[in-house]
Amino acid sequence: MSPRALFAGRSGGFVLIVVLWGAALLAVIALTFTQNTRLEAKAAHNIVSNAQARSLAEAAVQIGLKDGIATLFQRKQSRAARIRTDGTPFACTLPGGALAQIQIWDEGGKIDLNTARGPLLERAFQGTGLALAQARRLAHAVIDYRDANTARVSGGPEETGYGQAGKPYGSKDWLFESIFELAQVPGMSPAIFDRLAPYLTVHSGSQGVDRRAAPLPLLALLSGEDRGADRSAYELPQQFTARSRQAAFTMRAAVHMPGGGRFVRLAAIRPVETYRYRYEFASWRRGPSLERDLAGVSATTLQPC
């Protein structure tokens, strides 16, 4: 074979390799572009689905107002409330195949950190596993935190106790604005707070809890034993109870979209003029989505909201 022919053969092989590498590079670029397009499309779909879930969750709050809270104040009580105010979940379907779960709590069924009596606070803290002496100190610390003076309640910390507990601040000496402020009280641990948080409020203005509206786990905690769903079976001292003034409610509206979007709206609601169905929102925030939300629920078994 002549040198020229040999060179031509080698050149052809090199060109073939360059072409193959170029084709492979183009294929990689095309594949990357396709994957990015799919990811962007999926992200856009999730954004739309979550936005739809948010809008429907806010619509579900209005349904809760109409079919839960407003029904309580209807003069003729022409119909029973579809949605109870003791936290019982109510599930229904919304447009587009969405599923909604609405829960309403009468805050009168919870322990108000600003007005609860000392013995009620003691019993609640005991229910989390604290010994009586520890529960009493913590109850006194809560009262010290919320009272409007610097005088130390017997067993409470006031200013010196905060320093001894390693807190860089003193007692607030004013009302709790949120249940999350409880974490600032000396002696309060994350475990105790997490256990009690679902049963605490700053909105009811009541010294006790209304057993008709109280969550069943709270009744069990205060009575020391679980007596099932029969509220009348729970024996509570009279100083632990008070009739709800129905002055405030908490609502949780969770929505699941068929496309995977989810949203939870939490609202604290105060009736202003019940005969005109006027309300004000004391708080309005996004809540966490929970695994138990709409667990085992199918759209085929539910009625429209």
Image: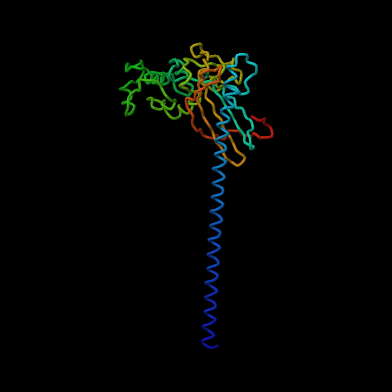
Residue 18 in sight here:
yes
Location of residue 71 by image quarter: top right
Q: Is residue 33 above or below residue 301?
A: below
Residue 222 in sight here:
no
Of residues 133 and 205, the one nearer the viewer is: 205
Q: Residue at (51%, 16%) from the top-left corner?
A: 209
Which residue extends farthest top?
238
Which residue extends farthest right?
300
Image position, residue 114 (x, y; %): 43, 19
Q: Count the marks.
A: 0
Instruction: Name the quarter where the N terminus is drawn.
Output: bottom right
Location of residue 214 by image quarter: top right
Q: Residue at (54%, 78%) from the top-left corner?
A: 12
Image position, residue 227 (x, y; %): 59, 19
Of residues 90 and 227, the one nearer the viewer is: 90
Of residues 143 and 282, the one nearer the viewer is: 282
Which residue extends farthest front?
276
Q: Is residue 9 above or below residue 75?
A: below
Q: Is residue 227 left or right of residue 113?
A: right
Of residues 20 and 69, the one nearer the viewer is: 69
Image position, residue 218 (x, y; %): 53, 21
Location of residue 160 by image quarter: top left
